[in-house]
Image (cartoon, helix red, strand yellow):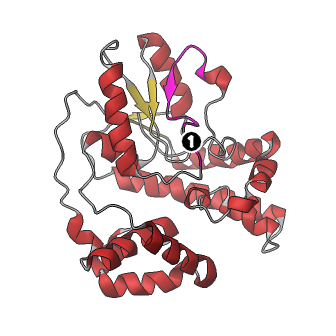
Amino acid sequence: MLGPTGVGKTGVGIQIAKKSGCPILSCDSRQIYKEMVIGTAAPSLEEQDGVPHYFIGSHSILDHYTAGQYELESLALLEKLFQSHDQVLMVGGSGLYIDAVCNGMDDFPPADLALRAQLSERVATEGVESLRFDLKRLDPVSYHQIDIKNPQRVVRALEVSLQTGRPFSSFKTHAPKERPFEIVKEGLTQERSTLYAKIDARVDRMMEKGLLEEVRSLIPFKNTPALRTVGYSELFDYFDGVCSLEESISLIKRNTRRYAKRQSSYWRRDNAIKWREVV
């Protein structure tokens, strides 16, 4: 089950899992980190009660983790789960992680951690704009395809291009891999103004639950790739004196709405998704 952030995937997924007696495999690229609970709207222990959840708080922000690793770990886990369950429910909104399990990842070269560290340092000191210029020169196809506002995406594309001497885009074959199980995709959608209002209200609840303190505790790790994400970046800017707390919260709401819009656009290409309107 997929859909834009804030649409209600967690609640609907748990209802389905309880009714069918199946476990839930989370496909959220941030809920996987144990240090990021409030800002990722990870399901609480009370919500998880009675339904086995996997990939919720299972890794640390200090771990180097990729969609490729998620593919391998998920497939190994699914092989075990299908020995005792007829179905497993995947719930989340990370398109790349969903594609990794359903279609497989292209065979990119292994990460060059030293080069990645250099590029990440450039992002921290020069800003992502400097890397965008290099990416446009080395791989114009990727420059126009990926989210160039996302430093992690730009760093990875440039890393591969510099490491191999080949454009990052040349490694993308888009050839789906066969899976030993049937895949049914269901998506949740909602009228835009309603979804956006829910997103704004959810950010307010996150602040009430202690998001500010959660982010404060992560300041020493703020340049970690996992933390370069909506809800955390804006509050780091507040702690750095770049903006007021009110402005930071407003930016979290705006950027979350924009992220939801990008998610919806990403999935429009997949005709296999059966969409369900959420009232």
Q: Looking at the image, which is closer to me, 207 or 214?
A: 214
Task: Give the left or right position of residue 20, taking residue 121 as reference.
Answer: left
Find residue 214 and report its horizontal and vertical position in percent: 76, 48
Vertical position of residue 128 compared to residue 254: above or below: below
Residue 140, image x, y percentages: 30, 81
Q: How many residues crowd around disc 1 within 10 Å: few (fewer than 14), some, or many (20 or more)?
A: many
- Magenta region, main secondary structure: loop
Q: Which residue appears farthest toward the front when viewing the image? A: 114
Q: Relative to the observer, which residue lies in front, 115 or 48?
A: 115
Residue segment shown in magenta: 48-60
The residue at 83%/68% (across/down) is 244
State the SS at label 1: loop
Q: Is residue 57 shown in magenta? A: yes
Residue 251 visible in the picture: no
Q: Quadrant of residue 102?
A: top left
Residue picked out by circle 1: 31
Magenta stretch: includes residue 130: no
Query: Picture coordinates of residue 96 (x, y %)?
Result: 38, 51
